[in-house]
Image (cartoon, rainbow, N blue to C red):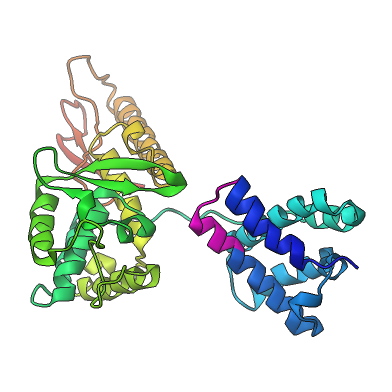
Amino acid sequence: MTLIAPTLQAFFTERLIKQRNASPRTIASYRDTLRLLLCFVRDTTGRPPSQLGWNDLDEPVIASFLAHLEHERHNSPRTRNLRLTAIRSLYRYAALRHPEHAAVIQRVLAIPTARFDRPQITFLTQTECQALIDAPDPSRWEGRRDRALLTLTIQAGLRVSEVTAINCGDVTLDTGAHVRIHGKGRKDRAVPLTSATQAVLAVWTAERAGNPTNPLFPTRTGRQLSRDAVERLVQVHTDTARHSCRTLHGRRVHPHVLRHSCAMSLLHAGVDSSVADDDRDGVDHARAELLDSREAVKAGNELIAAVTGANHKRDEQPLQLDRRSERADVFCVEVTNVVGDVDQGNVELLL
């Protein structure tokens, strides 16, 4: 029996760290996956990880582990597939070192990813974003910190890992105000700041008075905020904002919703989608919703022209999407110079 322990250690020290130069987050994700797998095998078979061989981690065991993640730990299919990706990476590495276990490894690598429905992207309107920003208590230190954090996150469309990793030296408030971000995939970018965001950050950085290497949004003890802490503060302030913004009732708001809100606001403002290409998911969903809306507006033009028997002339203004609408699914369409039984006025197109 070939033990997995030497190969498992070499997978992290040689494959991930030396050969692939993987990021700390990738290494941590793979570590957590394999730790869950080893604990699952120990609990189900009673064998400690130091005595496990490759035949003990065959396809039925891996499949049972994936089912355990979904049914007992209540992980989503996305998380299940993420764990499977880490396991596949380990087994592909082991295939080169242990050809005598090629059949076992091949069966594990053949486990398919789970299919899942893609939910509709949620986002906040400008009114909802402002209600969320105004929710923190400005009389408390945490409230002023959270207000600055929410303002920057919504305006810049930052991921949780990006906003928690910002240091005081990453913010420039002079001419050409911007914040430097070290993002996903080790990409660095500079995000320009609006005047409103500059004003909020100027007050907070003056109060923070930290060194350039200190986190911009720290805990009370000066440490970097965790992902759980950011998610918790977003939830707390969302609950507070519901008192002043009724449209937030029944809505689940998590930190990534703020990133989607930034993408939608850029597209609603007419910004080319290539400017916001860093958020591919949010931008793609936003673009699709806007295209659907424009198609509906075009159909409305054709319908009115058919009913009235009047065609829009080139110098007349056709139906257009009103970017001032509060929701992406409600559009105010202005009808002008229409003859017949259709009066001049506003028409609401509800999608």
Q: Quadrant of residue 153?
A: bottom left
Image coordinates for residue 133, horizontal then vertical, percent: 18, 63
Question: Which residue is rendered at x = 75% and y = 76% of the image?
Answer: 49
Q: Taking 127 as reference, is 231 above or below it?
A: below
The quadrant in which the N terminus is found is bottom right
Within the magenta stretch, is there residue 29? yes
Horizontally, residue 281 falls left or right of residue 56, namely: left
- Examine the structure image and report whether residue 76 is included in the region drawn in magenta: no
Give the percent coordinates (x, y) of residue 351: 36, 47
User: Residue at the location (76% across, 76% down)?
Assistant: 50
Instruction: Give coordinates of residue 138: x percent, y percent.
Output: 10, 72
Q: Nearer the viewer, residue 91 or 51?
A: 51
Extreme residue in the top direction:
314
Q: Is residue 125 visible?
A: no
Q: Relative to 31, is 169 above or below?
A: above
Magenta region, residue range: 20-30
Residue 313 spot, x, y in % from top left: 22, 15
Res 133 visible? yes
Residue 62: quadrant of the picture? bottom right
* Residue at 21% from the left image edge and 40% from the top image edge: 323
Q: How many marks?
A: 0
Magenta: main secondary structure equals helix
Query: Along the horizontal axis of the image, is 258 left or right of 135?
Result: right
Task: Please tell me which residue lies in front, 254 or 202.
Answer: 202
Residue closest to the eye, 46 or 11? 11
Q: In which quadrant of the rendered view does residue 285 lie?
A: top left
